[in-house]
Amino acid sequence: MPFDPHASSAEDTLSYSNLIAGDKDLVTAKVTIAAGAALTAGAVLGKITASGKYALSASAAGDGSETPDAILANDVDAAAADAEAVVYLEAEVNVDALSFGTGHDATSVRDALRQRGIYLRTVY
């Protein structure tokens, strides 16, 4: 099934709200979200160096996930166990549709995400 950023929520599809904010080609990947939280689409994620798993990026994490690396493309419940999810590795995203971990906001993540090909846009 081809990627559809406007698809409704279903297995192997992405839910689209107002997250995508431009015409840049989307680059996605399936990753593992570390157990510990239920996250919604638009969560700013960092990659844990030791495990390669992703978690909500918090500025004081100290495990590698403090550096913003990807944007969660669909809701995922990893509260009790690791879960697979799709992330955006390159995209133009609506800054108002993002959620941030402790110590992060749009200003603190903008440069790190831009270096990875993720651009934050304000949608009018």
Image (cartoon, helix red, strand yellow):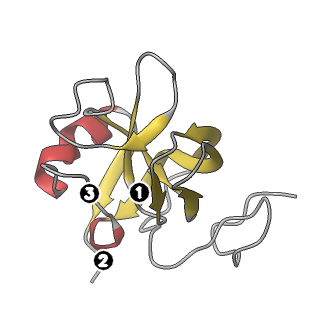
Residue at screen point 74% across, 58% down: 3
CA separation, marks 1 and 3? Answer: 17 Å
Say which mark, if any, is on residue 100: 3
Q: Amino acid at mark 3?
A: Phe
Secondary structure category for the residue under label 2: loop
Farthest right residue in view: 1
Q: Kindly identify which residue carries mark 1.
A: 92
Are the residues flagged by discs 3 and 2 in contact, CB closer than 8 Å?
A: no
Secondary structure category for the residue under label 1: strand
Q: What x and y, as percent, mark residue 31?
A: 61, 38
| Residue 43 as seen in the image, left or right of residue 122 | right
| Residue 19 as seen in the image, left or right of residue 96 | right
Give the mark toward the camera: 1 or 3: 3
Q: Kindly identify which residue carries mark 2.
A: 123
Q: What x and y, as percent, mark residue 107?
A: 11, 52
Using the image, determine if residue 60 lies above or below residue 17. above
Residue at screen point 56% across, 50% down: 25
CA separation, marks 3 and 2? Answer: 18 Å
Report which quarter residue 50 is drawn in: top left
Q: What x and y, as percent, mark residue 111?
A: 20, 39
Say which quadrant the C terminus sits in.
bottom left
Residue at screen point 31% across, 24% down: 64
| Residue 69 as seen in the image, left or right of residue 111 | right
Q: What x and y, as percent, mark residue 19?
A: 45, 69
Residue at screen point 21% across, 45% down: 109
